[in-house]
Amino acid sequence: MGHIGIARAAQRALQLDTVLFAPVGIQPLKPHGSSAGYQDRVAMTKLAIEGEPNFVLSLADAPNPNGTPNYTIDTLVELKQQFPAARLFTLMGADSLLSLPHWHRAAEVPFLAPLIVASRPGERLEDLAATLPAGVTIQADGPPSPGELEYPIRVLTLRSGAGDSTPLYLLPWLAIEISASEVRHHVRATLDRSCEGPELVPEAVCAYISAHDLYR
């Protein structure tokens, strides 16, 4: 539900036409992989976004035939080729921004598809310089977002060593206190019962997890 909440906020704040949800085949920063297979995660993603206007399942991050990890930079290049007229963004939580310097060709990502970053409880977005890849710097805030927006936006400017610039969009007041480990703990505790307790996953997803005996 945290992922869906962030996607809704970004869609409304920046008036996005479509939000793509792309389960990843092999996450380079998670060497032990996911405890659920790719096809199961695709099925759960489809169930999670069912009925959400303009939320679309994407297979852009499907496993590579040669078994190599999925890198965001490669996925973005393919998406730009697939949608040449579209303006693409990379949507993430603040925790993902903290890991950005460790991404493959990280310094290129914000300039290929500007970042939209949503805050999470306990994470500060004020001191961003340390979270950026080498060679990328931050300039002062751009124009403030209109006061009537449901989710106010901060707009910063990133500059590359080559002098290129790109906006960085922050949703600094969005706080959805759900972690992946909390979800897995809740799922394990409720697998043999109904999807009771905190609303961490959509009911259809919880039912799928139970039916396919995942996350035991």
Image: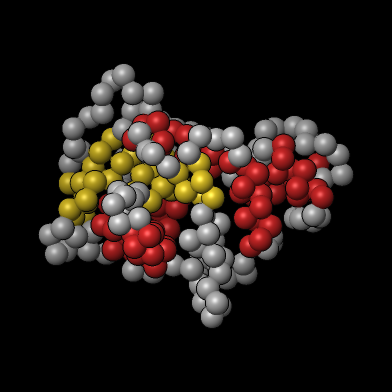
Q: Position of residue 52 (x, y in %)?
A: 55, 35
Which coloring applies here? secondary structure
Quarter holding residue 33: bottom right
Q: Quadrant of the N terminus?
A: top right
Q: Position of residue 58 (x, y in %)?
A: 51, 54
User: 114 left or right of 195?
Assistant: left
Q: Residue at x 12, y 59 (%)?
A: 163
Q: Quick one: which residue is furthest to the top in this view? A: 148
Q: How many marks?
A: 0
Pick the front one: 122 or 31: 31
**Residue 172 seen in render:** no
Pick the front one: 209 or 88: 88
Q: Is residue 106 above or below residue 114?
A: below
Q: Residue at x 75, y 49 (%)?
A: 209
Q: Quadrant of the C terminus?
A: bottom right
**Residue 9 seen in render:** yes
Q: Residue at x 59, y 45 (%)?
A: 179
Q: Quick one: which residue is furthest to the bottom in this view? A: 66
User: 96 left or right of 157?
Assistant: right
User: 53 left or right of 16?
Assistant: right
Quarter holding residue 133: bottom left
Q: Quick one: which residue is furthest to the left in this view? A: 163
Q: Is residue 19 above or below residue 63?
A: above
Quarter holding residue 107: bottom left
Q: Position of residue 134 (x, y in %)?
A: 27, 64
Q: Residue at x 16, y 63 (%)?
A: 161
Q: Position of residue 57 (x, y in %)?
A: 54, 50
